[in-house]
Amino acid sequence: MKLFKYLLLLIGLFKLQAQQISMNFPKFSGKSYDFIIFQGSEQKTIIQGIIPTDGRFTLSIPKEYIPYIGMSRWLITGTKEGGGLDMYIPGHVFSVSCLSAEPNEKNIIYSNNTGNDQLNALKKVQDSILLRHQSMTMALRSYAKSSSYYKAFVREEQMQKKVFEVFQNGLKTKDNFVNNFFGIVNIENGITSILTENQKIKADEIVKYISQNLNWDTLYTSGYWANIIQTWIYIHCNVLKDAVRFEREFKIISDKIVLMDRYSDFFNKLNFYLKELNKSDYLEKINSVKRIDNCNNKQ
């Protein structure tokens, strides 16, 4: 019994020390590549290599980042064509295979990692709703209110708004990297949880999501860390212009970022962008409530 427990412990330790991605890209043999992961403001190139003749090779996450759960970027380098792959890393071993010289969503096959396919599926559903809603919006602009079709278009447009809200609320019910990352990409693309053309409402929804719903651990390894922080600051300073609300949301976000190195990255980005915008009053507010170190974990 003791031996069995010891073996389980050894297996667990091995898994912590080995987070590997088996790659199979035979059509790209001989090409050099970089493998990048994201840590807040930094893009870290952790591996550089050349694809062997048979196209099979292994990418290993360095032990200091294990278990890494987040986005990565595998880039073909040294060629005019370039190319590469953005992929989700789920914190455990998996494999990726593509036998085509032109990789796409259909011919890139993941094993033991469904996250990338889930992201593609969510995008398809959302794009479909947005397309139907856009079609109805355009129809309402094209037809007079007296038209016999107008009321039907109004009903359909309202229906798509409700469908979209249900879809967005569904994303929030599951606190996993895939759903959280999808929400981050939506912010980057200016998509909020409600469909509206009112820019003030959209701005309000975006900062509300960032301060209340955003998972900052996901953001840290998403590749969008600096962009999202910049978006939050830009909206506050140039659209909402409410310094009291800014300070309140700053405190909420600060409480969510537990690790001190991540908080420092966040705080430094705030300082950089606020100085760039010449917002000394906002700088005073964040400096007056800056967290020095209220966590013991310094990872």
Image: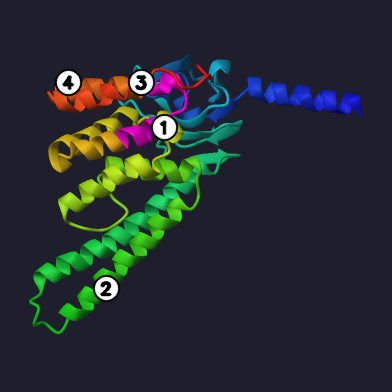
- Secondary structure of residue under mark 4: helix
Q: Where does the magenta region start and end?
A: 249-264
Q: Nearer the viewer, mark 2 or mark 4?
A: 4
Give the CA separation, mark 2 to mark 1.
Answer: 42 Å
**What residue did someone put label 1 on?**
255
**Does residue 292 appear in this view?**
yes
* Alpha carbon distance from label 4 to label 3: 15 Å
At numbered mark 1, what does the secondary structure look like: helix, strand or loop? helix
Q: State the mark number for residue 156.
A: 2
Depth check: give the residue in front, 162 or 109.
162
* Picture coordinates of residue 204, whole percent (x, y): 23, 48
Find out whether the residues at labels 2 and 4 contact each other: C-beta distance under 8 Å. Answer: no
**Is 69 included in the stretch rendered in magenta?**
no
Of marks 3 and 1, which one's residue comes earlier in the chain? 1
Mark earlier in primary sequence (1, 4)? 1
Residue 241: where, in percent of width, then height? 15, 39
Question: Which residue is at the far front?
Answer: 288
* Chief secondary structure of the magenta portion: helix
Characterize the local packing of mark 1: few (<14), some (14-19) or many (20 or more) Cα atoms within 10 angstroms: few
Residue 96 lies, with reference to residue 147, above or below; the image says above
Left of 178 or right of it: where is 228? Answer: left
Q: Magenta stretch containing residue 261, yes or no?
A: yes
Query: What residue do we see at 36% from left, 21% from top?
Result: 265
Residue type at mark 4? Lys
Q: CA distance from mark 2 to mark 4?
A: 46 Å
Q: Which residue is mark 3?
A: 265
**Disc 3, disc 1: CB below 8 Å?**
no
Q: Position of residue 262 (x, y in %)?
A: 41, 23
Q: In the image, which is nearer the foreground, mark 2 or mark 1?
A: 1
